Amino acid sequence: MLEKATSGTLSLFLSSDGQSIPFGRNWVATVEQALDSSALMFSFLSPVSTGSAWINFEAGYAYARGVKVVPVAIMGKDLNALNPPLSLLQGFNLKSHEGMNNILSVINATFSTSYPLSFNEDDYAGLFPAREKAATESFGSAAPYVTRVTMEILADEKAWESLRGEVIRQHGSVFSDGSKFAVSGLEVRKYVSEKGQAIEISVSPAHFNLHIPFLKLCAELAFVGNERVFVRLDQRAEISADMWEITGRLHDTPVKPVDNKFMFEEVVFEFAVVGVRGSRYAEDDICPIWAIAFDAAALAFPQTIRRLLDLLVKHVILEEDEIPF
């Protein structure tokens, strides 16, 4: 697709396409040779690739050689949630055809070319059709904004082993390195927080409905009740009003304010800031990165969550604040 958009005038190398590296070749040597002759590298970060040490090896080797490295988060990954070193580089989340056109923009800026920004919605839909459909089934018209669904719980080693055992029972095997495991859009890691041993659960939007039973089990095993589930939004998403304005915009809807939160049908929720980003308007300004936080009890009502997100988009509570690359 990229070769067609650039009329075949660029020399492209993809380390995992089965063609750039013929069968039987020394993989490492071939990658190094390709990177030595490159000026630009897009590092595509998916739930699978971020679990591999090779992604950092390739990017680090290229960066050390003076190659421009641009991380691109795909398939539900969020660049803001990644660890260094790749998170320190300027990149973007590929969530729409505009993200695909960002790739062409970077190519134009790097090589002084003028390829048309020609990718459209159909092109993007053709990349991940099943994933986009699944994400839309879970989050409706808000699906393009959702990067991950996360939960953090305080739990001991016994709970960790129970969760890992449940995933193996359901899926047969998992990718695991001792402190984390991952399978089918689900990533789970353990760490020590200020409050004790904790477990972080992260689910891609396309796999949310699949892993709702697992999220419910996590809430049951937690030491502390009232766990919250965060539907994390990407940098383009803006919660565009304060609580009073939100209440005003939703006054003719079933959404009602309750103790500095909101209630929609059976679901209690609030808007939470989970990070910051630079402003496109002023260098020194920072803007929030948002999430919609639900009580864990909301997991029993996934269709209510979808109807709520549709309503927030319809009433311009959740809207797009496009940030140029």
Image (cartoon, grey):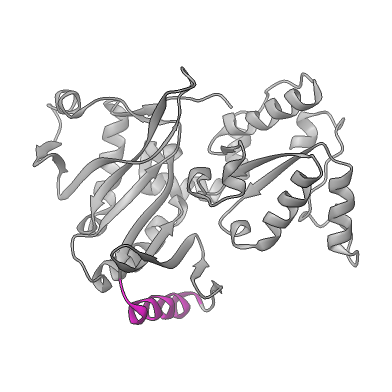
Q: Is residue 11 above or below residue 55?
A: above
Q: Position of residue 199 (x, y in %)?
A: 37, 66
Specify whether residue 160 is in view: yes
Q: Position of residue 319 (x, y in %)?
A: 36, 27
Q: Main secondary structure of the magenta part?
A: helix
Judge left or right: residue 59 versus residue 247. right
**Foreground residue, 247 or 170?**
247
Residue 212, located in which quarter of the rendered image?
Answer: bottom left
Q: Is residue 156 magenta?
A: yes
Quadrant of the rendering where the N terminus is positioned? top right
Residue 160, located in which quarter of the rendered image?
Answer: bottom left
In magenta, the rendered stretch is: 155-171
Q: Position of residue 259 (x, y in %)?
A: 8, 42
Quadrant of the rendering where the C terminus is positioned? top right
Residue farthest along the left direction in this orientation: 259
Judge left or right: residue 199 versus residue 249. right
The residue at the point 13 percent across, 27 percent down is 252
Q: Is residue 243 above or below residue 11?
A: above
**Foreground residue, 313 or 165?**
165
Specify whether residue 19 is in view: no
The residue at the point 38 percent across, 45 percent down is 232
Q: Is residue 169 magenta?
A: yes
